[in-house]
Image (tube, grey):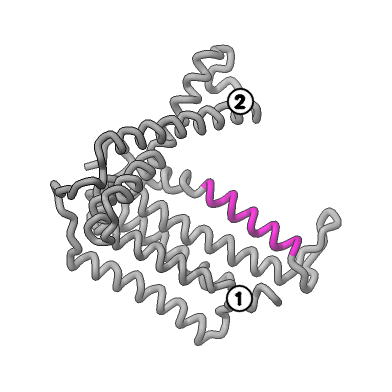
Amino acid sequence: MSAAPFPWVVTTTPLGRRNPTMKLALLFVVSFALLFVFDPLTPALLYPLALAAVLIWGRPSPRMLLLAHIPFLGFALGMLMINAITRPGEELFTVLGLQVSVEGVNLGTSLALRTFVLGVLSIGFVLSTDAVALTDSLHQQARLGPRLSHAVLAGYQMLQDLPGTWQTIRQAHGVRAPELAPGLRRPTIREFGHASFALLVVSLRRGERMAQSMESRGLGLTPRTIWKPIRLQRADWIMATGVLSVLAVVLGLGVAGGWIRGYSALWG
């Protein structure tokens, strides 16, 4: 069933039943490996594989998965455009007086595709991981202390609650301005800024209340028991073996094919 109070978090799927610490560790391993890759072909091969894995084993709603790509799309386009017009090299074409280089397009495409790879993996992690299970798993498998693990829980729950809070704020603004009823027109940049500032204030106040609540309960002062232990299972190790094998095969093909590039791509 879905993890209340976040109905979009589904833990009954094959990906949702996997150990949260193992999933987080694999996400860090893939992220670290891609830090040293600057060719567009390697992330282009990894992205459809990651997307298929999330769709098959995470089983998210296609619409939700598409909408979750929007923030990563903006960042990826920014990386592509900045590198295309600022990095020196062989001229590809000129637009509005700005020279677009071949090297800049290649590097920008690589960074943009890397953003999508890490983005879809992060989406799969968030949509399949219950916050409480993540905290218990980090406390048991990663040996995090109660203070730090519960701080992670508080932050993770706030992150998952942001979409609902944003919707509430927008609805509240609509009630106070009935002439701007939904569907009549799109919100202006000023209205969007007001809602964003309200979201920031609400998040800060909620974080302060959480910190005071955790302090009043004396978290970390005495040993804590665990109601439902989270264990590493055979399926978790199979998942880790599969992910690392796919990553190794793609990187190995890049080395054998000669297309993979490291930090040398930054200097031409």
Q: Residue at position x 43%, y 67% from top? A: 30
Q: Tell whether position 76 is magenta.
A: yes
Name the residue nearer the viewer: 4 or 55: 4
Place of residue 263 in the rendered image (x, y in percent of width and height, measured from the top left): 60, 76
Name the disc covering residue 101, or none.
none
Q: Quadrant of residue 7?
A: top left
User: Mark 1, residues whose alpha carbon is within 10 Å: few (<14), some, or many (≥20)?
Assistant: few
Q: Describe the element under mark 2 as helix, strand or loop.
A: helix
Q: Tell whether position 93 is magenta.
A: no
What residue is disc 2 on? 191
Q: Residue at position x 64%, y 68% from top? A: 107
Place of residue 172 in the rendered image (x, y in percent of width and height, measured from the top left): 48, 19
- What secondary structure characterizes most of the magenta part? helix
Question: Amino acid type of disc 2?
Answer: Glu
**Left or right: residue 205 compared with residue 232:** right
User: Mark 2, residues whose alpha carbon is within 10 Å: few (<14), some, or many (≥20)?
Assistant: few
Q: What stretch is highlighted in magenta?
A: 70-86
What residue is disc 1 on? 263
Name the residue nearer the viewer: 236 or 105: 236
Between tags 1 and 2, which lies in front? 1
Q: Residue furthest right?
A: 97
Name the residue nearer the viewer: 87 or 105: 87
Q: Residue at position x 50%, y 87% from top? A: 256
Tally the marks.
2
Q: How far apart are marks 1 and 2 (CA)?
A: 43 Å
Question: Amino acid type of disc 1?
Answer: Tyr
